[in-house]
Image (cartoon, rainbow, N blue to C red):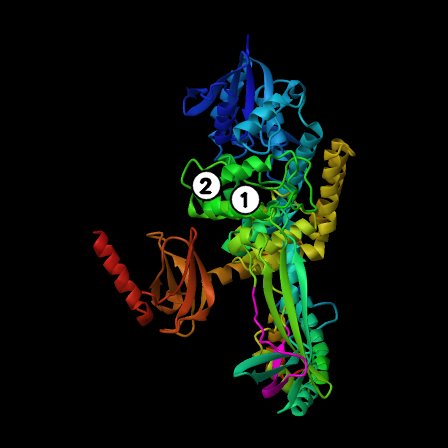
Amino acid sequence: MTEEEARCPICGRICRADAQFCGYHENAREELERGYKEWSAAMPITWNEYLSQLIEAEETGMWIREMIEFIMSTDDL
Amino acid sequence: MGHTLVISEKPAAAERIARALDEGNEPRVMKKGRLTYYECEREGNKLVVVYALGHLFELKQTEKGWTYPRLETEWVPRYEVDKKASDVKPVINLIKKLSREADSFIVATDYDIEGSLIGFLTLKYACNVDPHGAKRMRFSTLTRDDLVRAYEKMLPTLDFPMIESGYVRHQVDWLYGINLTRALTLAIKRASGWFKIVSTGRVQGPTLSFVAEREKEINLFIPTPYWTIDAVGEYNGNDLVFEYHKKRVDRLDEAQQIVNELKGARLNVSAVKATRSTVSPPVPFNLSGLQSEAYRHFGFKPSRTLALAQRLYLDALISYPRTSSQKIPPSIDTQSILEELKSQSQYERLIRVLEEQRRAEPVQGEKTDPAHPAIHPTGKKPERRLTPSERKLYDLIVRRFLAVFGEDSIRESMRVDLAHAGHTFHLRGRRVIKEGWMKLYGKYVRVEEQELPTLREGDVVPIERIEASEKMNQPPPRYNPASLLKQLERENLGTKATRAGIVDSLRSRGYTLSDRFELSTLGYATVETLERHVPQILSPEFTRRLEMDMEAIREGKRDREEVLFEAKRDLLQILDRFKEHEEEIGAELVEGLKRYWKTQEELGPCPKCGEGTLVIVRSPKTGKRFVGCSRYREGGCDLTFPLPQKGRIVPLDKHCEYCGYQMIRVVSGRRTWETCINWANCPGRQEDLKALQKRREKKE
């Protein structure tokens, strides 16, 4: 581990090479995007509505939830 | 003339063997200090029956130093490597003494890898004789008949391929367990100066990786919505709940359209079908089948089931439990067992039922074991009062044994199809036509019956209510002790005797939280670090190959030394790689450990000062633990809460519904309870405290 290695802004783990997040949260971001396609095919829904519904659902995984909270707090991505 | 020394595995087994082999069934009970051994007379021979206490000898490194790699080992008395095993020393001395006057030796330990190895090592290192001259008793129950038969049909030599396999298993497990644990521990020491043992092993690593893989799936799970069409109709004054032909509709607009088209519709009964199916009895229990069923019905962890089964075996109530077999071979006198069971009042009625409907041969499963049959009762009446848990397990084993002789059961499934404008609904019913084996298995069968009203083709049933209900698909379930054990069995990792302990070790070493196998922060750190630097430690393929090699030794297809050489070579490669990255590995594990300890000790923000954190602390003066604020020293926040002094405290992610304070779980022995940290003043706890006070007063 070196000083230069970037840290995930969500959990503090080392970031994946050339990525903004660690492996887990990078995967969570990818899953969120994939999931939005599925939700959009199932019902008319905006990105923000999608995130709000996911954060309410108890089945939503922990890393997904953390990524949503991060997105909502930074209004990023 | 000298005597014959009979070596058994445990004190209870020694007593049973001695009673069975003595012609008068009254062996002389000999005392040597606190130890007991037995002298028997049989056909003019004097037999001296002694016991080991499991393994009397263990591996120890020959080179000095708590470091790695350490590859060379020797067998030494167990008390030399385990300070708690002081009871082993007099046992070895007694066996040594009795073996001097012995002119022949019989090994009568459990007939499996461990038992055979115990016998071999005892002969070699305690008796100082050549094990090739010893004979072997082979039995699957500790009943008199079985033991006498085993004595009369003794094997002329020990089962050396089985011993070789056990020998190399111990060596490989020692090599991997000791060296990898030291590598992890020393990496932490180098990074932080702390000496904190972080363990892993040949099977523990892959087991941890299964849990981590499942955890990732759960943590990355995104539920997706789907809709079910819930419709209720009325027929002859009764509500009927219909099942739409598509179990799930993936789009909201489609679900809404279906509802719109069917509102107020009148459904026509288009078909009424009934099909009958026969259901065979379940197969006889092997160990994992028993563990799985005991978890399902009683919530027993696999290790507990094994311990209970072992006690029942030593009481000669059931056959040897560490078996893979799902077969009851013809050599077992099942008729006698059933007759003996009939003399136990609780089974008399069931045996009578069985006599009326018994199948000629018991149902057999597919799995086999060369050493032992499936787990079955011996029919003997318990000679002591069984504990409630033992009684439950015994009953399950007896009922499964009876069920395998039962006739097939017959079930009828009914389906009524109701249609309207291209839409179809179903009504489903189920009933048991003939109970068969289910009557014998009794409360362990779960059958849900569903009666249907009498409907005929052409009947019309109006829909009273219909709606589209939104549902979410579910994440995969976390492992439980039984399902993780099954996974190890499926992956051919570990042995039937070791799997339960490995499953327990994940919890006891802090890698998982609770029995739900939720990965702890320490578990995450260990998996992440090993995955990045030495993934072989977590690889199921790697350890499965070793298992296959050990099985090949048992079958006489591979040589022990060759397998050991390869295992050492592979281990050295892993350790070299580990050494290269030791600094990074240490730093990452230290970070994980810090997070783990934090979650174990921190209880959230301090409600009094609002700046500190409530933590579990131990008083340096009294040694007692309590909850205090982290700003006690610098900020002077003196908020404290008392804690129970016994048991493990687990902070919970919830707050008390009465006072709003943080909840904790206390795990003390087998008792577990939840309370808030403010329990002494919590209004919700006052009734409990009054009741406790009353109980105390009554006692006094």
Query: Dot 2 falls on which chain?
Result: B
Residue B5 placement: quadrant:
top right
- In the picture as drawn, the residue positioned furthest to the top comes out as B1
Read off the chain for label 1. B
Q: Where is residue B325 in the image (x, y as percent from the top left)?
A: 65, 42
- Residue B257: image x %, image y %? 69, 90
Q: Give the range drawn in magenta.
A: B448-473
Which image quadrant for residue A12?
bottom right
Q: Is residue B34 left or right of residue B413?
A: left
Q: Residues within 10 Å of mark 2 (few under 14, many from 20)?
A: some
The three-letter code of the residue at mark 2 reads Gln
Real-space Cα separation, disc 1 to disc 2, in angstroms: 24 Å
Q: Is mark 1 on a helix, strand or loop?
A: helix
Find disc 2 in the rendering and name its residue. B344
Q: Mark 1 points at which residue?
A: B306
Q: Do labels 1 and 2 share a chain?
A: yes
| Residue B462 included in the magenta stretch of the image | yes
Which residue occupies the foreground of this view, B596 or B186?
Answer: B596
Q: Does the magenta stretch include residue B231?
A: no
**Number of the label disc, if any, that sits on residue B215:** none
